[in-house]
Image (spheres, rainbow, N blue to C red):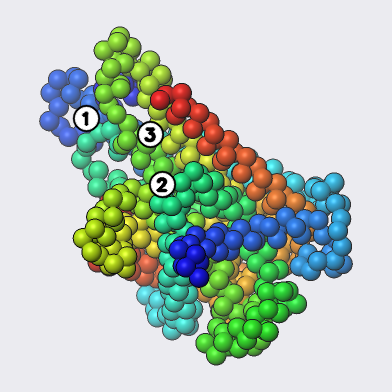
Amino acid sequence: MRWIRKHLLAFAALAVLVYMLVPNVVVALFSFNKPSGRYNYEWTKFSTDAWQHPCGTPGICDSLGLSLKIGITASVVATILGTMVAFALGRHRFRGRASTNLLIFMPMATPEVVMGSSLLTLFVMMGVPSGSGAILIAHIMFCLSFVVVAVKARVAALDPRLEEAAADLGATPVQTFLRVTLPLTAPGIAAGALLAFSLSFDDYIITNFNASPSSITFPMYVWGASTRGTPVQINVIGTIMFLVALVVVIGGQLLGSRRQRAAA
Amino acid sequence: MASVHAPQVEPQAPALSTGSATTPARRRRNVVPYVLLLPGMLWLVVFFVVPMITLASQSLQEGSVDQGYVFTGNVGVYGEALSQYWEQLVRSIGYAASATVLALLFGYPLAYFIAQKAGRWKNILLVLVIAPFFTSFLIRTLARQTILSDGGWVATAAKTTHVTDLLQLLRLTENDRLMASKFAVICGLTYNFLPFMILPLYASLERLDGRLVEAAGDLYASPREAFRHVTWPLSLPGVVAGTLLTFIPAAGDFINSKLLGNTNTVMIGQVIDAQFLRVLNYPLAAALSFVLLVLIVTLVAVYVRRAGTEELV
């Protein structure tokens, strides 16, 4: 009994973690199911069919490809713009700082449904056609703030004396930036880019307001499937995404700790 | 040092510079931040601020999608929107607030454990918190349908242990099902936004100096008192950030209410979505969207002021 009390916190933490991970386990488990009907909700029979034919249902891999394309483009653009903003905020004192911070914070404090619908009204009034272009604009917009927050923390923690030292040792400003500033802020930039990609890749609500029938992203495909019947391939792709994310995040951490050790 | 970032930049935004610049070096230093800010801020102004204006303008127009809209300043649409959908609006705030409280209750112990007790497991546990977030949100919500489905073992276990009866008593379900209920929607909202709660909590708890808690103990504070007077106040920035990052998206969400709820759990996001994309009543939808925005901004402003945290970003 005392042992339980002593480890109560660990048990609570573990229970919450389990609650968070159970859906992923279910997704993986049901990727080996062979459902009897159109919906993959009840366990019927073990099968690896879906794993052998991950693109086996029409449209699924096209939507995946579109989501990857939009996700990569949006995260690259948002990371470049966001990193510039983060450097301005982390490095410079200037007038309008408070309003800049507010403008960065606002998209994170606005429900997606409001951002999606307001963009729709803008695009309708300006005659901008809905589709992948409109989706891309929207994704860059809502990813930007998250990149700024991720990079800014890193820039603020940077010791300015390191750059001064580089300059004292005769490095040109460009050299200093490329060989001192950039490597030191890279983990923040990478984290921001990764976050931007996953936000873009996963977005349904904003995308739905700006999509056309020819621009079905993967989340939109899944949403449609939830009313038409869910192919097992959805679970296969969900599981692959989980594994890839795990590898990327763990790989990033290992890289980070190795660099830390090398630096120490 | 300022010249590190963009030494070749010409002072092309004199309107933005502070004007006190005299020497070229000084002027360049003043211009650099604005040049860095310009593209990103422009993007946010054009695609975030301007749409808010077009949204407000859209709500005051009359017409139809086919024949076009004319601005008539029809404020009456707001009365219509509120009288028809106040219930969904109130419900959204209520569900989001419940999910936020639950996420705080669930997230705090885990964040505390990872930050203070996990030792070398810290990084692995953090990965496990973030990893689910990388699998599509919709796929995970569909998995929750499977978990809570009628014949499933969770539903059966809940029935045999009379948890379902309790939920029914609390009006969280309307019958003996777990799926398609208020319970399922709030569970889903809590689950979906938990990482947004845990990460800021973790960030502020990680900075917490364990010696302060020890000092409180040395000064005869009970663990409970130490928590109340030391740990909790020091973690408040994380609590404020986490609750905001959970509450705001939860209030506008309609994926959980649509996939896990029933017709009595419809949230405001669902109404806005349907009015815009299916009913095509743009003015009403825009009015609802605008009301939601104003409501959230007001709540957030009051909350942040009361919590007294200035630097959130």
Q: Which one is in front, B34 or B190?
A: B190
Is residue A36 in sight in this rendering?
yes
Where, by quadrant of the figure, is residue B300 drawn? bottom left
Image point 85% across, 66% down: which residue?
A: A44
Q: Is mark 3 on a helix, strand or loop?
A: helix
Residue where numbered disc 2 is placed: A145
Q: Camera-side residue: B79 or B189?
A: B189
Q: In the picture shown, does residue B310 fall above or below B297?
A: above
In the displayed structure image, the side of residue B231 where residue A186 appears, left or right? right
- Callout 1: few (<14), some (14-19), or many (20+) C-alpha neighbours within 10 Å? many
- Separation of marks 3 and 1 at Cα, in angstroms: 15 Å
In three-dimensional space, the C-alpha distance between marks 2 and 1, rounded to whole angstroms, equals: 23 Å
Is the C-beta separation of discs 3 and 1 under 8 Å? no
- Which residue, given by chain and number where applicable, does mark 1 sit on? B30
Q: Which image quarter is the N terminus of chain B in?
A: top left
Query: Residue B17 placed where, x, y %?
Result: 21, 33
Which subunit holds the residue at mark 1? B
Which circle's residue, 2 or 3, is located before the other in the chain? 3
* Mark 2 in CB contact with mark 3 (< 8 angstroms): no
Residue A261 to residue B154: above or below: above
Nearer to us: label 2 or label 1: 2
- Mark 3 neighbour density, 10 Å: few (under 14) some (14–19) many (20 or more): many
Label 1 amino acid? Asn
Label at residue A84? 3
Q: Is mark 2 on a helix, strand or loop?
A: helix
Amino acid type, mark 3:
Met
Are dots 3 and 1 on a single chain?
Answer: no
